[in-house]
Amino acid sequence: MRVTIVGAGVAGLTCAHAFAQRGAQVTVLERKSGSGQGCSWFAGGMLAPWCERESAEPLVAELGFESLDYWRREVPDVPAEGSLVLAQARDLPDLKRFSRRTEGYEWIDGARLGALEPDLAGRFEQGLFFPTEAHLEPRKALAALTGRLVNEYGVTFRYQSDVTSAVYDAADASAAVDDEADVVLDCRGLAARDVLPDLRGVKGEMLVLYSTEITLKRPVRMLHPRIPVYIVPRGDGHFMIGATSIENDERGRVTGRSLLELLSAVYALHPAFGEAEVVEIGADVRPAFPDNLPRIRRHGRTIRVNGFYRHGFLLAPALARRAAELAFDGTHFPEVMDEDRRQW
């Protein structure tokens, strides 16, 4: 099978892997100069299906468990240290509310928290520990996956490709891409609104801090009255702080208000962050359907994989496997293909 994939973000790369593993001849087209330079570049990389279950549909956790196994199996340096959810004493009702909406956690006291994260000792009375969760560094993970695709599977990458900005025909987008491909996968994210009018943009803002005064082994979600934040350790004193979730499609624009609230929340986790160096500030727009759940849509030889909302790394491998089984075996997956999800 000859397959052309449009888009080299986390969706496109995991689809390339799923198809290449089935023996397909894969070409990936990307308008940027390298892989993972869209909204994947600014992702947190938390592989936390139980934590996401607190506010997301059960399907997100179901797909997330599969994807968690995928990342731990297929790319190096995926720490499986679990994750923490914490709140200050005045916000303990929020922590209890969080616990009622999910599973897979242990209630821990301050002593256990100090054993898990010594730099947080004495700062919180209790918290939630999710021992089976993990995290990764998105940029390194996608670089590693790209290398595997090239070296092990012979996948061809064509960067700065003008074809990715071609006008797609809603009837058959593949005609605008590659007349010789048996299957074309449209993994363009929000750029696919030209053929997926029900997509919307949800902006996420993040920053990276550097500090030698605090060490964390695992992601920490800090419940906060205004913006709950997560802090993801990236190694060598670097921490990714994210992320806002704003209903607009203003790419790259970070507001002072968002920065103030993110910094305020992370300072509440540990005052050492108040003296941390701001290394990077960034924002991009994530694609989402009205119900914030992903879709696979097929029309002719075109398969569109989209709508990951805030859960790109948590959903992409599971959707990629389904897209490959759809193309090779004709398998139908109602949970991501049927528009009326009440049927499953």
Image: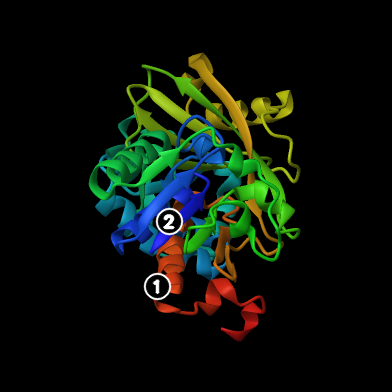
**Residue 138 position in % (x across, y down):** 42, 39
Q: Nearest the camera: 255 or 223?
A: 255
**Picture quadrant where residue 119 is located:** top left
State the residue lying farthest toward the front. Answer: 180
Res. 15 mark: 2
Number of marks in picture: 2
At x 33% / y 43%, what residue is drawn?
145
Disc 2 residue type? Cys
Q: Residue at x 55, y 71 (%)?
A: 336
At 31% from the left edge and 64% from the top edge, which residue is drawn?
A: 22
Quick one: SS at disc 2?
helix
96 sits to left or right of 198: left
Q: Is residue 13 left or right of residue 131?
A: right
Q: Quadrant of the N terminus?
A: bottom left
In the image, residue 250 lies at what x, y percent? 74, 35
Location of mark 1 (residue): 328
**Along the line of sight, the residue nearer the viewer: 27 or 298:** 27
Which amino acid, by three-letter code, is at mark 1? Phe
Near mark 1 (Cα within 10 A), the count class, few <14, some 14-19 or many ≥20, is some
Q: Which mark is residue 247?
A: none
Residue 204, position in %: x, y? 63, 39
- Circle 2 residues within 10 Å: few <14, some 14–19, many ≥20: many
- Quick check: can you spot residue 128? no
Q: Secondary structure at mark 1?
A: helix
* Marks 1 and 2, how far apart at CA: 13 Å
Instruction: Tell me the quadrant of the picture where the C terminus can be found.
Output: bottom right
Specify whether residue 31 is in view: yes
Q: Which of these two is toward me, 89 or 193?
A: 193
Whether residue 144 is situated above or below residue 63 in the rendered picture: above
Question: Contact (CB < 8 A) between labels 1 and 2?
Answer: no
Q: Residue at x 59, y 48 (%)?
A: 188
Residue 243 percent across, percent down from the top left: 59, 38
